[in-house]
Amino acid sequence: MTTAENQLRREVIRTARALQSTGLTHGTSGNVSVRYNNGMLITPSGIPYEDLEMKKIVFMDLEGGYFGDFLPSSEWRMHMDIYRNYKDAEAVVHCHSARATALSTHNKGIPAFHYMVAVAGGDQIKCADYATFGTKALSKAMIDALEDRTACLLAHHGQIAFGPSLHKALGLAGEVEALADQYLSALVLGEPAPLCPAEMKEILRKFKSYGKQLDTLDGDDAGAFEMPQRRD
């Protein structure tokens, strides 16, 4: 294994263990992958996160073939199809976080009750139709729910998120869980009023430049925010 591959394997293990330490999953549920060398490195099937070693992380190509002595996660197809459909996807995190899973058991996504739903790239976070875990049908339902977004819920199952790095994908999964928690709390008083489509369109425009610094902003991005005045 090359130094770069070893580093990615370590990051996959670190991210998988973070799912447990942050409460985003329990036991051996959930799985993590990162794009690598025209394929992906993915957590193995059924091995507790505390027992993971670099040699147990499975390399798969994007045609569904795996290499080595360990079986890949049973959810490998969802990861593979994200990499095949989204060229900017570099890492995928799937977990059974409590609040997102609770919503998914009602086949319910997260509407525009709060502007932060835009963190996943759309005006809502959809819930994919139910299908048996590990199947083509589930992967297709997931792709349909994602559309141009980077996260969705999976009915009666959990959530999945992807991003430009393992750190970002894990962070997004945490954001989805936090939004699910807030939405469930809001539902105690009834269905919250959603933000209007025009406002969500503006929020999505502003999110394109959220977190960028001056040297990375172009003219349109800078216009998305009221900029503070620099004092010399």
Image (cartoon, rainbow, N blue to C red):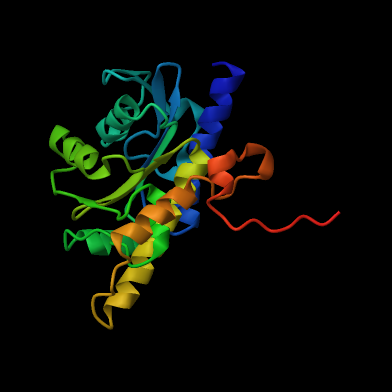
In the picture, which quadrant includes the N terminus? top right
Residue at 31 percent of width and 40 percent of height: 148
Q: Residue furthest bottom?
A: 189
The reply, left or right, for residue 144 in relation to residue 58 is left
Residue 176 in picture, x, y percent from top left? 38, 56
Q: Is residue 16 visible?
A: no
In the picture, which quadrant includes the C terminus? bottom right
Residue at 42 percent of width and 60 percent of height: 116
The reply, left or right, for residue 160 in relation to residue 20 is left
The reply, left or right, for residue 13 in relation to residue 130 is right
Residue 190 in picture, x, y percent from top left? 24, 80
Identify which residue, 226 or 26, lies in the foreground: 226
Compared to residue 43, the image places residue 177 above or below, namely: below
Compared to residue 84, the image places residue 221 above or below, namely: below
Q: Is residue 79 visible?
A: yes
Q: Residue furthest right?
A: 232
Residue 203 in picture, x, y percent from top left? 43, 56
Identify which residue, 211 or 1, lies in the foreground: 211
Residue 24 in picture, x, y percent from top left? 41, 56
Residue at 27 percent of width and 29 percent of height: 81
Total marks in image: 0
Residue at 33 percent of width and 58 percent of height: 198
